[in-house]
């Protein structure tokens, strides 16, 4: 995290920056005048980071929470909010997803509809 | 009441309950193969254990792994251990994880050895918020 003191107007703000090839670049636009001097305080632990969308799989988990019931007991391959393939075998479902040009589907085996809540080990 | 990021943990994730468990998307990698799946966080599980089919999809020779017997409250089961990369919400670890010997078991858990013991984890279940960071990432 980068803390900047705007000396000319006394304003203090914080923003994230990245250091690449010897240059410290802000990760958001800065409205500074050309040649304006600022004071920097460096904190090398960035602020809370968003998780990239592929890691979050938010749409896929939403599908699993709301639309999975008809496919209970099956394997499903999901890409975003789309059901790409489903069936009884993981390998077959994954192959079908690849055939549909989805290289990295979320591959999930849905529990059977009759399953009781998991009570722990 | 608002709960701030505990111990400077950087990643915050609004999780969903699937099958009445805290579910997170994860990636398992072995050599050049990777598979995207959903696992549940289980602080009571001693190890990370995944379905047999995921070992097959990772091109692992299941039974060549380390055989381990686990107990549950009223039974036992066997699983085979293999070293893989586990990526959970952008946090990557290389760990020995297990795959059920019995392919009919539908359960994928992130447990203590190999995952919980390598991350900083916080939960605010009332808000469905999960805080996660690598253990070797210095806190803010």
Image (cartoon, coloured by chain):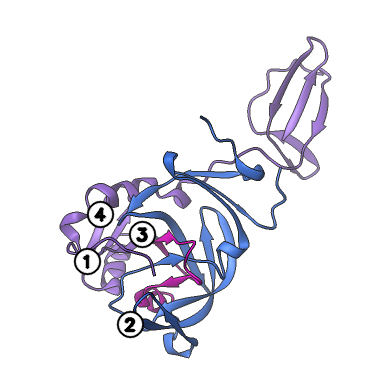
Chain colours: A purple, B blue
Q: Are marks 1 and 4 in contact (CB under 8 Å)?
A: no
Residue highlighted by disc 3: A105
Q: CA distance from mark 1 to mark 3?
A: 15 Å
Q: Which is in the foreground here, disc 1 or disc 3?
A: 1
Q: Which residue is mark 1?
A: A74
Residue A115 appears in the figure: yes
Q: Are discs 4 and 3 less than 8 Å apart at CB?
A: no
Judged from the image, the secondary structure of the residue bearing numbered disc 1 is: loop
- Same chain for the residues at labels 1 and 4, yes or no? yes
Classify mark 3: residues with Cα within 10 Å, few (<14), some (14-19) or many (20+): many
Q: Residue furthest bottom?
A: B64
Q: Which dot, 2 or 1, sits closer to the camera?
A: 2
Residue at left 83%, top 15%?
A7
The answer to whether residue A35 is above or below residue B119 is above
> Which numbered disc flags the more N-terminal residue, 4 or 3?
4
For the residues labelled 4 and 3, the Cα–Cα distance comes to: 9 Å
Chain ID for label 4? A
Question: Horizontal placement of B68 versus A92: left or right?
Answer: right
- The crowd level at tag 4 (other Cα within 10 Å; few <14, some 14-19, many 20+) is some
Does residue B48 appear left or right of residue A36 in this picture?
Answer: left
In which image quadrant can residue A2 be found?
Answer: top right
* Image quarter of residue B140: top right
Describe the element under mark 2 as helix, strand or loop.
Answer: loop
- Quote the CA–CA distance across marks 2 and 4: 27 Å
Q: Which mark is residue B102?
A: 2
Disc 1 is attached to a residue of which chain? Answer: A
The residues bearing labels 2 and 3 have C-alpha atoms spaced at a distance of 24 Å
């Amino acid at each position: 995290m980068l803390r900047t003191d705007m000396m000319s107007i006394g304003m203090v703000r914080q923003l994230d920056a990245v250091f690449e090839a010897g240059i410290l670049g802000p990760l958001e636009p800065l409205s500074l005048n050309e040649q304006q001097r600022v004071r920097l305080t460096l904190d090398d632990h960035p602020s809370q980071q968003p998780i990239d969308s592929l890691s979050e799989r938010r749409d896929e988990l939403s599908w699993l929470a709301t639309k999975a019931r008809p496919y209970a007991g099956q394997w499903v391959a999901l890409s975003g909010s789309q059901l790409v393939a489903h069936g009884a075998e993981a390998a077959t479902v994954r192959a079908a997803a690849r055939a549909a040009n989805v290289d990295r589907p979320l591959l999930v085996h849905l529990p059977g509809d009759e399953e009781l809540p998991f009570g722990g080990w | 009441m608002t709960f701030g990021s505990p111990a400077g943990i950087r990643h915050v994730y609004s999780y969903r309950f699937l099958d009445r468990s805290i579910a997170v998307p994860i990636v398992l990698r072995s050599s050049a193969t990777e598979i995207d799946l959903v696992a549940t966080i289980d602080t009571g599980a001693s190890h990370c254990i995944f379905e047999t089919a995921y070992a097959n999809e990772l091109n692992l020779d299941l039974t060549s792994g380390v055989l381990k017997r686990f107990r549950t409250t009223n039974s036992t089961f066997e699983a085979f251990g293999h070293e893989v990369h586990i990526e959970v919400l952008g946090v990557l670890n290389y760990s020995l994880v297990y795959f059920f010997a019995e392919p009919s078991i539908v359960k994928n858990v992130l447990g203590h050895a190999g995952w919980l013991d390598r991350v900083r984890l916080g939960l605010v279940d009332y808000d469905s918020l999960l805080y996660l960071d690598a253990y070797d990432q210095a806190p803010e």
